[in-house]
Each structure stands twice: as C-alpha cells, then as structure tokens.
Image: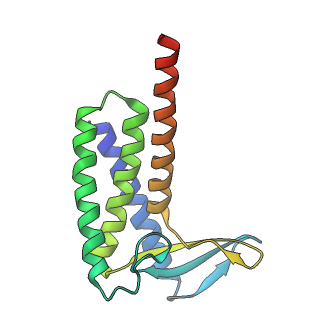
C-alpha cells in the first residue's frame, strides 16, 4: 500500500512544484512559445475539464472539491483492496495524485492552475497541468488493465 501512496505523493509534489514555478515566472495570461506546437501559459480554470462550469458563480469550487475528496477516499479503499494488482494500483495512484494535486489548487485559490498549451495551427487544446496528465495517464492505464484482464480470461478458457 505504501508504494502506491508514495507514487501519489510524488505526483502531487511534481504537480505543485511545476505550478509554483509557472506562478513565479508568469503573470496571469502570459505565455511563452516553446515549440511550433507548444506554449507555456499561466491560465486559471475555475471549472472542470475544458473549463466545464467555469462560469457557475463559485459553487463549482466546492462541488468539484467534494467530488475530488469522495473519489480520493474511494480510490484509497480500492488501493487497499487491490494492492497486489500492480497495473491497476499504479493507475489508481496516478489518478489519486492528480485529483489531490488539483484539489489543493481549488481549496487554496478557487481555481486550478493550468500551464501546458498544445496547439495545431490556430486550434489550441485546452490548457492543462501535470495533475491532469496524471489523471489521463491513470485512466488510460485502467482501460489497458481492463483489456489485459479479458485476455487472461480468454487464455484460461
């Protein structure tokens, strides 16, 4: 169990350090081109993914905080129950770290700090952060793990 929680803590620390660095070097809305398809930018997201409910008048801060807390408690329960399932637990640890990294921002600031801005031509993907990346990677690993389980079941038949 400790190794999974350690992974979650590493995700939280890297997420918070990267956000602190961006906050110290950039003013809100400022950006810096890094490549022909990637900028660093200081953005604030008071909503969820893709700024969902960002204009809901402030209630979303507490709604998304409550969801993150409930999800985190559930994930810890799942980690305890399934700690021997390595890929599953690794994925959950990434999701837990990402959820708590963004929860820290919501509680401290009322918004999540985003700074990774990828684009193609004039189309910009929604800015995101390391916590969002960990959640996405964790979700992809959960999907992969679910398919691996079906392969083992089919091979056992």
Picture coordinates of residue 52, whole percent (x, y)? 44, 75
Q: Quadrant of residue 105?
A: bottom left
**Residue 8, image x and y in percent?**
35, 50
* Rendered view: 132 above or below 30: above
Q: Position of residue 33 (x, y in %)?
A: 70, 78
The percent position of residue 102, horizontal first and vertical second, equals 36, 67
Q: Quadrant of the N terminus?
A: top left
83 displayed left or right of 30: left
- The colour scheme applied to this rendered structure is rainbow
Q: Relative to the observer, which residue lies in front, 10 or 109?
A: 109
92 and 8: which is toward the camera: 92
User: For the point 24% across and 45% down, which residue is it?
Assistant: 76
The residue nearer to you, when weighing 86 against 28, is 86
Q: Residue at x 57, y 79 (%)?
A: 41
- Taking depth in this image into account, of 101 and 34 the one nearest to the observer is 101
- Looking at the image, residue 92 lies above or below residue 27: above
Q: Is residue 11 above or below residue 85?
A: below
Toward the top, the furthest residue is 157
Residue displayed at 51% across by 89% down: 27
Q: Residue at x 36, y 29 (%)?
A: 85
Taking the image as shown, residue 133 lies to the left or right of residue 97, namely right
Q: Tell whether 65 sits left or right of 135.
A: left
Instruction: Determine the image quadrant of residue 45.
Output: bottom left
């Amino acid at each position: 169990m400790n190794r999974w929680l350690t992974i979650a803590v590493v995700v939280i620390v890297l997420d918070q350090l990267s956000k602190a660095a961006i906050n110290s070097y950039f003013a809100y809305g400022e950006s810096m081109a890094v490549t022909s398809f990637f900028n660093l930018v200081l953005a604030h997201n008071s909503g969820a993914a893709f700024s969902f409910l960002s204009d809901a008048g402030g209630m979303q801060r507490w709604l998304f905080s409550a969801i993150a807390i409930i999800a985190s408690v559930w994930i810890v329960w799942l980690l305890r129950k399934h700690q021997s399932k390595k890929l599953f637990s690794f994925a959950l640890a990434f999701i837990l770290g990402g959820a708590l990294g963004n929860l820290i921002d919501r509680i401290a600031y009322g918004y999540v700090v985003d700074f990774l801005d990828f684009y193609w031509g004039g189309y910009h993907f929604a800015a995101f952060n390391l916590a969002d990346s960990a959640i996405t990677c964790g979700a992809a690993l959960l999907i992969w793990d679910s398919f691996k389980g079906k392969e083992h079941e089919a091979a056992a038949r």
